[in-house]
Amino acid sequence: VRPGCALLSLLSSLLLLLLLRLLWCPTDAPARSRLLVDESEEDPQGTSPALRILRSPAPPIPPTTNSTYLDEKSLQLTEKCKNLQSDLNSLFNRTKRQKEDDYLQIITDIQNCPWKRQAEEYENFRAKLTSCCDAIQNFVVSQNNTPIGTNMSYEVESKRTIPIGENIFHMLPASQPFVEYPYKQCAVVGNGGILNNSLCGAEIDKFDFVFRCNIPPTNGNVSKDVGSKTNLVTINPSIIMLKYQNLKKKAEFLQDIATYGDAFLLLPAFSYRANTGPSLKVYHTLRESKARQKVLFFHPKYLKQLGLFWRTKGVDAYRLSTGLMIASVAVEMCENVKLYGFWPFSKTVENTPVSHHYYDNQLPKLGFHKMPKEYSHFLHLHMKGIIKLQFGKCET
């Protein structure tokens, strides 16, 4: 065989191998992996440059993500979250009675939407509450807003009045007693059975100010779910009358409220005439016993104005629930408000039965409160980023 032919054959083979390498490599691979091999570079094992090109590993193709699909999903979720407001409005405005399952479906959808505090929405809503009611100055009866000689009208029995003489006047704080207002982080803890096994106790106890309703139990095993910290707790005078037999069970009463430390005890002494006697008796009992707790009284004018405010929003109940009253106060007193234990339904979104309270299953009087309608407003405030609702278990 001629030497020239052999050389030509070798060159042809090399060119063929290089062409195959070019076709095999992806176009976006680094140039050094495709062709650029210094033919003069000697391999210790004597491997030819052509074979080294073929043996060099092809660069891995980076995994691709379907970003268009993800963007579409995100947009669909955003659109769905926006539509929830109108879905809730439609449910709220139904003339026939709303079904529990309809609410639970909307709540399921709300849980899938991200929550973010909206400062502007919060300030606007707080300004409306302040304009109507001004909780900071008016929600408790004080010497500042109720001087001696005032003929104070009852909240519900508005044609009835009670004269504020020296006896009652000296029971009142000089002015609003919340010296650290505004509070940064506040929790309003309802008594719903949804708190059972929620493990929310540790989270609740981290708040700057904790509101509770109707002296619920907080010690023992329940504390892991409901917490133990309390800065203000309401007392319905009917509890004084029924559970403590108008304080004939004084020792039991004092033992129960001792768990609240130095919290404020808030009573609606001037909502009905029947409330006045038991409420004043609580004040005298605590003073005689030198208890740590301080007694405050809801101002009847504030409660009346607040009722009118929520009536314009569609809450036409005979009377607002204590939870809605306290949540309204919290929005004015605090920078951030989170609600726990507000759940007016008989089951969870997972269809698990729920007791009315975390400590019993005693239902409220029919027609007295409009719990689902009130809860609709809590849902609206949650979706607007004004308050945050805890729907189930807390992260531990």
Image: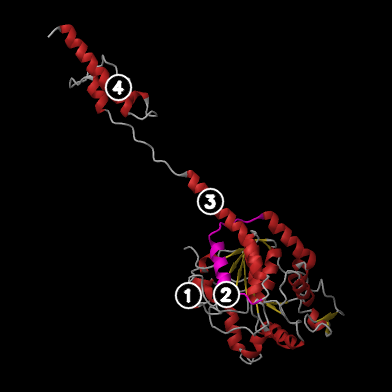
* Furthest-left residue in this view: 1
Looking at the rendered structure, the kind of residue marked 4 is Leu
Looking at the rendered structure, the kind of residue marked 3 is Ser
Please tell me which residue lies in front, 270 or 361: 361
| Residue 198 versus residue 2 in the image, above or below | below
Magenta span contains residue 102: yes
Q: CA distance from mark 2 to mark 1?
A: 13 Å
- Name the N-terminal-most of marks 4 and 2: 4
Q: Are marks 3 and 1 in contact (CB under 8 Å)?
A: no
Q: Secondary structure at mark 3?
A: helix
- Name the N-terminal-most of marks 1 and 4: 4
> Crowdedness of circle 3 by 10 Å Cα count: few (<14), some, many (20+)?
few
Where does the magenta region start and end? 96-118
Q: Secondary structure at mark 1?
A: loop
Q: Residue at x 83, y 80 (%)?
A: 152
For discs 3 and 4, the disc positioned in front in the rendered view: 4
Looking at the rendered structure, the kind of residue marked 2 is Glu
Q: Secondary structure at mark 2?
A: helix
- Name the N-terminal-most of marks 2 and 3: 3
Q: Dot 2 corresponds to which residue?
A: 100
Q: Position of residue 246 (x, y in %)?
A: 66, 91
